[in-house]
Amino acid sequence: WGAWAVPSWAMPGAAPVPQAPERPSMPVIIDPGHGGTDLGAVVKGLREKDIALAVALKLKARLKGLPVILTRDRDLYVTLDRRIVESVDWGGAAFISIHLNEVKSKKMSGAVVYSYGHEQRRGRRRKLHPSVPPMPAPPRVEAMESEFLARSIVKALREAGIQVEPATKSDYYVLKSPSSPSVLVELGFLSN
C-alpha cells in the first residue's frame, strides 16, 4: 500500500508527540474502520480493515502521553452503533475513524477528512447499513467542533506533505457522536 497511504507521523520511527500542559485528560478515541467479517475495501489482496488497524495502532503509539482508546485493537467486527455508544461511555475528547477509499476512477488520490454535515459531493453512492438504528445529527456545538478538528487535521496533513482535499462534510454514522468532535479520515485510495 506504500507510503502514499500512510501519513509521515504514522510511519515507523516517528518521534512521539511532545507533552503539553493543556492536553485533555479525556481519551482520544481512535476507530479503525471495519474489522472481522467486514473487510472494507479490498484491492489486489490489500484489505482496508487490516491497514486501518495497523495505522490506528501506530497512531496510538505516536500519541504517547495522551490517553487513547481504540474501538478495536485486533481483527474483530464492531457494530457502528457500538462504536458510538462506547465512545460516549468512555467520555472521549475526540473520535477519529480511520478508513481508506476505493473508487473506479484512477484519477482520484490523496486523503479526505470528513466532519458531520450535508454531503457536498453529488452522485456519490454509499453502502447503507440497514441494521443500524437511526442516529440523529450531533448537537450543533459538537458539529462545529468536528468541523474545526477536520480542518486542523487537513492542515497538519498538508504541512506533513500529504496530498489532502479540503475538509468535507458527510452524514456517515460515526460522525454523529452526541458528546465529542468526530471525524472520519480516508487515508488514501487503495484503487490507485
Image (cartoon, grey):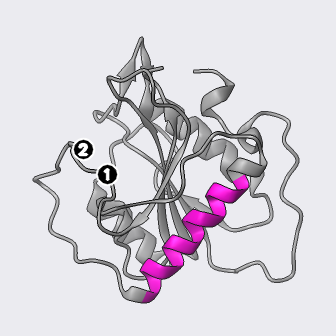
Question: Outermost residue, left direction?
Answer: 130
Give x and y (percent) for residue 145: 53, 79
CB under 8 Å between discs 1 and 2: yes
Residues at marks 1 and 2, CA–CA distance in whole angstroms:
7 Å
Main SS category, magenta section? helix
Q: Residue furthest top?
A: 44
**What is the number of the mark on residue 124?**
2
- For residue 70, the mark is none
Q: Is residue 161 above or below residue 42?
A: below
Secondary element type, mark 1? loop
- Going 84% across and 42% down the picture, which residue do you hit? 14
Residue 2 point in image, percent of width and height: 64, 21
Number of disc labels: 2
Picture residue at 48% right of the left edge, 81% below the top? 144
Report the span colored magenta: 141-156
* Residue at (85, 36) in percent of width and height: 13
Label 1 is placed on what type of residue? Arg
Looking at the image, residue 125 sits to the left or right of residue 12; the answer is: left
Vertically, is 122 above or below 54?
A: below
Marking on residue 121: 1
Characterize the local packing of mark 2: few (<14), some (14-19) or many (20 or more) Cα atoms within 10 angstroms. few
